[in-house]
Image: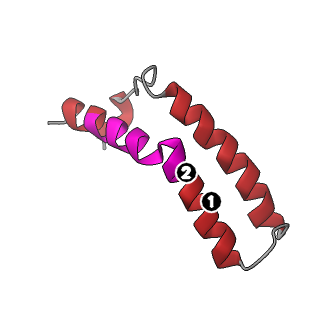
Amino acid sequence: MTYPYGQFVAEVSSIQAQINNINEIHTNYMSQIAYGKYNGSAEDIVEEYRAALKQAGFEDVVSELQAQVNDLYK
């Protein structure tokens, strides 16, 4: 069976800054969440994490990558 998505290589130069910011946010928040090192409830920290990702451009990155996949696999 062939895997149709094996030929996709993302072009990230236009979104690299957002990806770097997302990686930094993920690293900071995941260590807090994984080890329970946060103030307030788990729901609060996850909401804060999601808001930080959104502000960093997560939705733009997903949209760009989806557009590239769509262009490749029309």
Would you say residue 58 sits in the magenta stretch? yes
* Residue at x-position 41% and y-position 48%: 59
Q: Which segment is the magenta one?
A: 54-67
| Up-down relation of residue 50 to residue 71 (above or below) | below
Query: What's the mark number on residue 49?
Result: 1
Residue 35 in picture, x, y percent from top left = 84, 66
Residues 2 and 73: in front is 73
Residue 70 in picture, x, y percent from top left = 22, 38
Image-based side of 12 in relation to 52, left or right? left
* Residue at x-position 23% and y-position 30%: 72
| Up-down relation of residue 23 to residue 12 (above or below) | below
Asked whether the beta carbons under mark 2 and mark 1 sit within 8 Å of each other, the answer is yes
| Up-down relation of residue 35 to residue 31 (above or below) | below
Residue at the disc numbered 2: 53
Would you say residue 30 sits in the magenta stretch? no
Q: CA distance from mark 2 to mark 1?
A: 6 Å
Can you see residue 36? yes
Can you see residue 3? no
